[in-house]
Image (tube, helix red, strand yellow):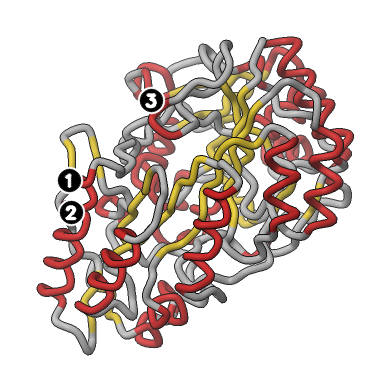
Amino acid sequence: MINFYILPRGYLVGPKKQIPLGVLYLCAALKERYGDKVALVDLSVSDIESVLDNDATVHMFSITSLEIGLLNKAAKLLKGKCCDNSVIVGGPGVLAKEMIDMANIDCVCYGHADEEICDIVEGVINGELEKLHVCNPISDIDRLPIPARDMVDGALGGGIFSYDHEYKDGGSTNIISSRGCPYTCAFCSSPSWTRKVMMRDPKLIRKEMEHVIETYGVRQFRFSDDMFTLSDSRIKAVCDEISGLDAVYRISCRVKPMTEYMLQRLRESGCVELSFGVESFDDNVLSTLNKKTTAEDNVNAIRLAKEYGFTVRVLFMVNTPGQTEDTIKMNMEALEGLEYDILACSIFAPLPGTDVWARPEKYGIRIVNRNMDDYNIYSFDGNGLREHIRLFEYIDQDTDKMEEVSYGFRRWLSECGRINKG
């Protein structure tokens, strides 16, 4: 028996809003070889120790750096119950392998494991695989099976649109049209193996959407691509294919490139909401974070999207490298002069795998706390606006002052009534 676990994500207010798409891709590949011997176990709704006490011999985890503490606990429990238990871990969190309790892990996988996940399982069982395994690049993304949504217990998603608006009955789910992002933002913890952009055949995207509609009655989709709007030609290819499905969807994208042609085709094919990675209206912050965009780009994209009738979600970040007291004023002035629908404000954290984590001094900061249990980029938790936990100090700025104005800005956003709280 092979168990693939979903660890609790207590840092999220709404952990069920997106299914674990990457895990479901891997489960689909495992099911093709092992059938009903593969199980998806959601530890967020169970007592970890009792669920881990079962007949499975292979235990798999996909983690971010924020789940390392829970991974270590689960792996220790598994090894304590039976020395024959095999524990395999992958995902972006393995970039912080120095924080992983390697004594209780049989294999740490780097890269996209979709095409070799079954061989990894066999190699670990037979003792033929190195403890650190680097996966080969995916040869053809279109050969991968669609995610095993049938293994999800309950809804396939929820509240994917602003203020949990529902455009269609039947719930929602997430989907991808590509993997990877060519940009290298300093705060992004996407590992190096995601730098290559792999685009799915638009016909296969439509086929998967049709499958979801026919099988589950779901007509609301969130595209979880790192970068949906790569070019006019890509938008044309995808939108031409999925038009006419009687479905609506939301995408995440950069403010550049963003053209009127893209916006027109997106609207015609059912896109109703755009999530723009804005981060700041201070050019110094954007330059420091290597965004390759400007405050003017941010303003132009938001205004143009509203002209085309989209719901606009602004993705923002505070307490960043490069920030000054003037940054907060610039942000407030820009937002007061713009029409947008909702804003998600995260708190900068120097996550493992980022350039800031590797070279903090380059960004004018000094990391003082590397305990992943304290790392949380979200502004809200179940109790409301979250208090700030210090992870780093500014080298040339007053850290106390920067944290004070950052918290004040988050409070101002909350009082404006257009901030995302989950």
Which of discs 3 and 2 lies nearer the camera? The answer is 2
Q: Earlier in the sequence, mark 1 or mark 3?
A: 3
Q: Which residue is mark 2?
A: 412
Relative placement, left or right, of 4 versus 400 is right
Residue 330 is drawn in which quadrant? bottom left
| For residue 132, above or below residue 24 | below
For label 3, the residue is: 44
Residue at 68%, 66% (x, y): give it.
182
Q: Quadrant of the C terminus?
A: top left
Which residue lies at the image location 64% right of the left edge and 39% below the top edge? 223
Q: Position of residue 131 (x, y in %)?
A: 61, 53
- The reply to whether callout 3 and callout 2 are in contact (CB within 8 Å) is no
When asked about the image quadrant of residue 53, the answer is: top left
Residue 55 in sight: no
Is residue 199 shown left or right of residue 12?
Answer: right
Q: Residue at x 64, y 16 (%)?
A: 218
Above or below, comparing residue 216 to residue 371 in the picture: above
Distance from disc 3 to disc 2, alpha carbons, whole Å, reads: 32 Å
Q: Residues within 10 Å of mark 2 (few under 14, many from 20)?
A: few
Helix, strand or loop status at disc 2 = helix
Q: Nearer the viewer, residue 20 or 290?
A: 290
Nearest to the observer: residue 63 or residue 293: 293
Q: Position of residue 379 (x, y in %)?
A: 26, 48
Proximity of marks 1 and 2: CB atoms separated by less than 8 Å:
yes
Q: Amino acid at mark 3?
A: Ser
Of callouts 3 and 2, the N-terminal one: 3
* Crowd tier of the residue under label 1, counting other residues whose Cα lies within 10 Å: few below 14, some 14–19, many 20 or above: few
Q: Residue at x 75, y 58 (%)?
A: 197
CB under 8 Å between discs 1 and 3: no
